[in-house]
Image (tube, rainbow, N blue to C red):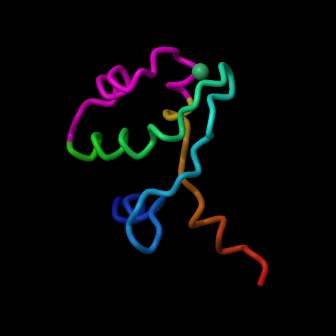
Amino acid sequence: MIQRQEQRGRNRTGEEKMLVPIRCFSCGKPIAHLWEELHARMAKGEDRQKVMDSLGLDRYCCRAQFLGHIDMIEDIAKFKKN
Ligand SMILES: [Zn+2]
């Protein structure tokens, strides 16, 4: 189960997928470019709260975009037409 969650959100080369919203739905701040750094630093054991603070995610609307986001591209891709 843990292994599956680690694989989710990664493509064949092991890079993080970018399916997080480009901008915060509430305030419009561009946030998608912060997703990879957030997860890279969290994987190293840094505290999520401190990483978000250092990335400039001050408003709780922007923070919520990351807290509630689940990468599902691998699951959704199984149903593509071809
Ligand atoms: Zn926001």
Left or right: 9 in relation to 79: left
Q: Is residue 69 above or below residue 47?
A: below
Give the quarter of the image for residue 6: bottom left
> From the viewer's perspective, is residue 49 above or below residue 40?
above
Front-lying residue, 66 or 34: 34
Q: Residue furthest top?
A: 59
Between residues 51 and 70, which one lies in front from this camera angle? 51
Q: Residue at x 77, y 84 (%)?
A: 82
Residue 49 is inside the magenta segment: yes
Across and down, in percent, residue 12 comes to 44, 74
Residue at the image point whose x is 78% and y is 78% from the top: 81
Residue at horizontal 36 percent and vertical 42 percent from the top: 37
60 vs 37, left or right, is right
- Total number of numbered labels? 0
Q: Does the magenta stretch include residue 15?
A: no
- Quadrant of the image for the N terminus? bottom left
Residue 76 versus residue 67 in the image, above or below: below
Residue 80: image location, x then y, percent: 73, 74
Which quarter holds ligand 1? top right
Region in magenta: 45-64
